[in-house]
């Protein structure tokens, strides 16, 4: 499968500080690729380089098979970008926001109008075409920004935290639309600090922390490799339970108010804990990407 993005030892520094500290990854055509990590991991700094908004401090970057710096103008015609902040024009109604944006790509008016209406329909905003931006809810604004990022029919869509700040219902609505775009073959690169978003949408992802890549791979595979199938979660663990676990052939992560037990040999431990440490409130759940981050760093993804 052809490669859409090839990042080789990519670096971004602000003075002495390395926000992106030599990361390498490839995004293939048609896949949804994620950059997952806590606040400050370097996700936004990375993707700003990918769409030419911020120059590299070091390393190499090819987009659509060619060095990005050497064909930036042409590449920008083929990329859609949705930044974290809703930078819509508050002085223009919904439809005009799309049409004005289309001018940056020299899209003829008639084609821009047809495209804009089709996008408004796709994002369930066609009833709002004449509304002012101030009248829109947070979810509608985000869907409009997404619609705007598709006005030039991009081959690559870059999304910086597409659902941050949205309520769960709006978030699911955005996920459904992104899944449909994926099915149509669009290549998507997104950043996120929601593990559910990353697991659901991404074919492959990298987990970043402090400017570096911790791991990369398919979400389910990473969970299997670093955590296993299930995890016992204990809320407010007692000293007795902690003492008991010390003597068991399991690994656990003690976060103080929460304790997580990994690499469970079978059901016996959970049965034992729920029987003999009933007051500790143990639950058994499926392992997830948050556990992977915790296993690798000893810290929580969302602190
Ligand atoms: N223009 C800048 N000048 C100085 N430092 C910066 C600048 N932009 C980002 N940083 C720093 O670089 C680091 C990475 O920031 P970045 O925004 O890339 O992280 P992030 O993973 O996208 O986090 P978030 O989820 O909060 O957006 C942070 O420590 C941030 O303070």
Image: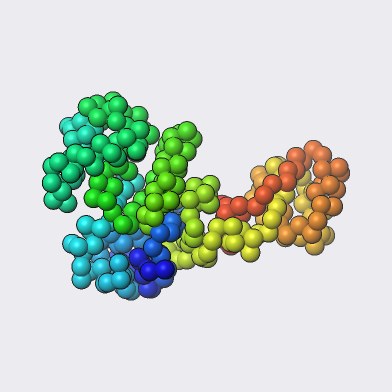
Q: Quadrant of residue 210?
A: bottom left
Residue positioned 41% across, 42% down in the render: 177
Question: Is 47 positioned to the left or the right of 116 in the image?
Answer: right
Q: Position of residue 222 (x, y in %)?
A: 58, 61
The residue nearer to you, when weighing 7 against 290, is 7
Q: Position of residue 300 (x, y in %)?
A: 56, 52
The residue nearer to you, when weighing 273 against 201, is 201
Q: Is residue 29 above or below residue 231?
A: below
Would residue 122 be seen by someone viewing this image from the given angle?
yes
Residue positioned 18% across, 43% down in the render: 112
Split into 4 quadrants, where in the image is the N terminus?
bottom left
Residue positioned 75% across, 43% down in the render: 282
Q: Position of residue 59 (x, y in %)?
A: 33, 74
Question: Is 271 positioned to the left or the right of 46 in the image?
Answer: right
Question: Is 70 positioned to the left or the right of 234 in the image?
Answer: left
Would residue 259 be seen by someone viewing this image from the given angle?
no
The residue nearer to you, when weighing 130 against 280, is 130
């Amino acid at each position: 499968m052809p490669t859409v993005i090839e990042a080789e030892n990519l670096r971004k520094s602000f003075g002495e500080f390395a926000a992106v500290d030599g990361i390498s990854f490839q995004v293939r055509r048609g896949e949804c690729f994620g950059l997952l990590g806590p606040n400050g991991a370097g996700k936004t700094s990375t993707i700003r380089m990918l769409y030419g908004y911020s120059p590299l401090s070091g390393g190499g970057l090819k987009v659509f098979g060619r060095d990005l710096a050497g064909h930036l103008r042409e590449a920008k015609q083929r990329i859609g970008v949705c930044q974290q902040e809703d930078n819509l024009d508050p002085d223009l109604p919904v439809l005009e926001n799309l049409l004005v944006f289309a001018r940056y790509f020299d899209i003829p008016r008639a084609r821009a109008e047809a495209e804009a209406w089709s996008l408004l329909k796709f994002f369930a905003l066609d009833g709002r075409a004449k509304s002012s931006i101030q009248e829109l809810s947070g979810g509608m604004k985000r869907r409009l920004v997404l619609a705007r990022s598709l006005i030039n029919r991009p081959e690559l869509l870059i999304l910086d935290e597409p659902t941050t700040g949205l309520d769960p219902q709006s978030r699911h609505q955005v996920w459904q639309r992104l899944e449909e775009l994926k099915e149509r073959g669009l290549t998507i690169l997104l950043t996120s600090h929601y593990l559910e978003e990353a697991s659901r949408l991404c074919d492959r992802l990298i987990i970043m922390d402090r400017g570096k890549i911790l791991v990369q791979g398919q979400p389910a595979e990473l969970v299997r490799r670093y955590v296993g199938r299930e995890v016992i979660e204990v809320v407010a663990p007692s000293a007795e339970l902690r003492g008991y676990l010390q003597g068991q052939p399991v690994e656990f992560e003690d976060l103080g108010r929460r304790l997580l037990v990994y690499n469970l040999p079978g059901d016996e431990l959970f049965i034992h804990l729920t029987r003999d440490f009933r007051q500790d409130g143990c639950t058994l759940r499926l392992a997830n990407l948050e556990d992977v981050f915790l296993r690798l760093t000893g810290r929580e993804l969302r602190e």
